[in-house]
Image (spheres, helix red, strand yellow):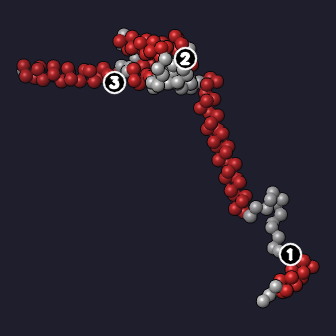
Amino acid sequence: MSRLVLLLGISLAVLAPTAAAEGGASLTEIEKQVMCPVCGTLLQLAESPQAQRERAFINRLIDEGRSEEEVKDALVAEYGNEVLALPPDSGFSLSAYVVPIVAFLIAAAALAIGVLRWRRGGSGGTGAPPSAGPSGEDAERLDADLARYDL
């Protein structure tokens, strides 16, 4: 029985930090998701004094046991929405996600239509089928000209 309790205690001691790390926030993960308000670069890359203060602020919140979302919410409350590396996925900021997708789809459709027209023979947009060659007088003159160059 005592061995079972000892084994259970050791396994809890080993697994507890892992479980806490999964649920808690980490500075390196948050640094990838927020910006330095002075530099305008990812906090992960920023070296300004303001970036150092922001890191200290994040570490203080992490030490208080705040989750990643709570830390980001506190950063937004402190510095504004510009501190987030990704814009919110609602309201006008949704256009940052939608516009590139729509532009890509329009460009792909225009390219497909252009390729189809080109493959059909490139009638130049007139709708008339391309001519088979010269006719009448032009054909006779062409034959005469070519006959002169026969060797």
Residue underneath mark 2: 38
Which of discs 1 and 2 lies nearer the camera? The answer is: 2
Mark 1 or mark 2: name the one nearer the start of the chain.
2
Decide if residue 53 is on the left or right side of residue 137: left
The image position of residue 41, as x and y in percent, is 52, 24
- Decide: is 77 above or below 2: above
Task: Give, as a three-letter code, the residue at label 3.
Answer: Glu
Q: Nearer the viewer, residue 134 or 42?
A: 42
* Label at residue 22: 3
Give percent across and percent down for residue 63. Answer: 35, 12
Residue 107 on image: x %, y %: 67, 45
Question: Please, what secondary structure does the residue beneath circle 2 have?
Answer: loop
Q: Above or below — where is 52 with respect to 145? A: above
The quarter in which the C terminus is drawn is bottom right
Task: Give the distance between the C-alpha atoms of the residues marked 3 and 2, in whole angstroms.
Answer: 31 Å
Task: Residue under label 1, please give it.
Answer: 134
Q: Residues within 10 Å of mark 1 (few under 14, many from 20)?
A: few
Return the residue found at the far right.
Answer: 137
Q: Are marks 1 and 2 in contact (CB under 8 Å)?
A: no
Quadrant assignment, res 59: top left
**Front-most of 48 and 119?**
48
Quarter occupied by the N terminus: top left
* Mark 2 surroundings: few (<14), some (14-19) or many (≥20) residues within 10 A: few
